[in-house]
Amino acid sequence: MQYQGVLTKMETEFSNPINYYLVFETDFINVNQLLNKTLKISFVKYQCLNCGLDKPIYRQGFCKSCFFDIPQAADWIMRPELSTAHLDKEDRDLEYEKKVQLQPHIVYLANSSNVKVGVTRKSQVPTRWIDQGAHEAIEIVEVPNRYIAGITEVALKSHVADKTNWRKMLKNDIEDENLVHWRERLKDYIPDEAKDYYIANNSETNINFPVLKYPQKPSSLNLLKAKEFEGKLVGIKGQYFIFEDQTVFNIRANEGLVVSIAIN
């Protein structure tokens, strides 16, 4: 059986364990059903997720010209504190920016390799936590726009991490933490603009991933360099494929690549 399509972030379904799906233009693959099967992944060409052209991908699935032009790749995407739609001030496309920025956002704690703080739209809970490979997470505040979420994250980054160690996450070298205690410990550092939005009475969300075997020394696959790779799939965590030989493949980092996937 063989499939071909442009890679985009895997779709997920919150279940025990998480269900993963690769969505191509003409195919829909339940990745969980591929566990313990041998996959051959081959690079075919590029396809920018915006313009659709066969141009080298620069970042986030976009070619270089699109990355520096479209609102989906603006600085406020990665740095929410730079959001300006609440001021009616345009960055690249005010209509798009209002649509995305002026909706409820969550500042959360997630534990994947360590406890970290992050921001996501409310509509992306728990998808964002799944994509990060977090085995537990909890909301801290729910605010009305992206800017307030961003300045809250900046304030809390001085007291808790904001990055995930992907190797530690994939090795499952993790410890369970009491995120309720973490949330209460960080409460005093929430900026004044967000204090009224503090969530005092919630519990952790726990996440279980479909992994048969964790790698002890994960090695990242560079498909552009290798052109093709073959191995037995033994796990899916975050946005990674985990193979029996400890090779791991980050689907999210390879968005915009057209690949063929043969299943044996």
Image (cartoon, helix red, strand yellow):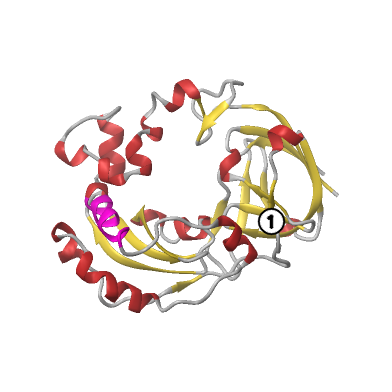
85 sits to left or right of 204: left
Residue 78: percent from left, percent from top: 38, 43
User: Is residue 131 rendered to the left or right of residue 80?
Assistant: right
Residue drawn at 28 percent across, 43 percent down: 101
Give the magenta-colored segment's residue range: 148-158
**Residue 29 relative to residue 18: left or right:** right
Q: Quadrant of the N terminus?
A: top right
The residue shown at (63%, 53%) is: 240
Please check the rendered image and state whether residue 195 is part of the magenta-colored stretch, yes or no. Answer: no
Q: Is residue 148 above or below residue 100?
A: below
Quarter of the rendering containing residue 244: bottom right
Q: For mark 1, what is the residue?
A: 218
Q: Amino acid at mark 1?
A: Pro
Q: Position of residue 40 (x, y in %)?
A: 80, 43
The residue shown at (25%, 31%) is 94
Farthest-out residue, front: 158
Kindly report the secondary structure that dominates the magenta region of the rendered protein.
helix
Vertical relation: 73 (above or below) 100: above
- Quick one: which residue is furthest to the right in this view? 264
Location of residue 80 in the rendering, given as x and y in whole percent from the top left corner: 30, 45
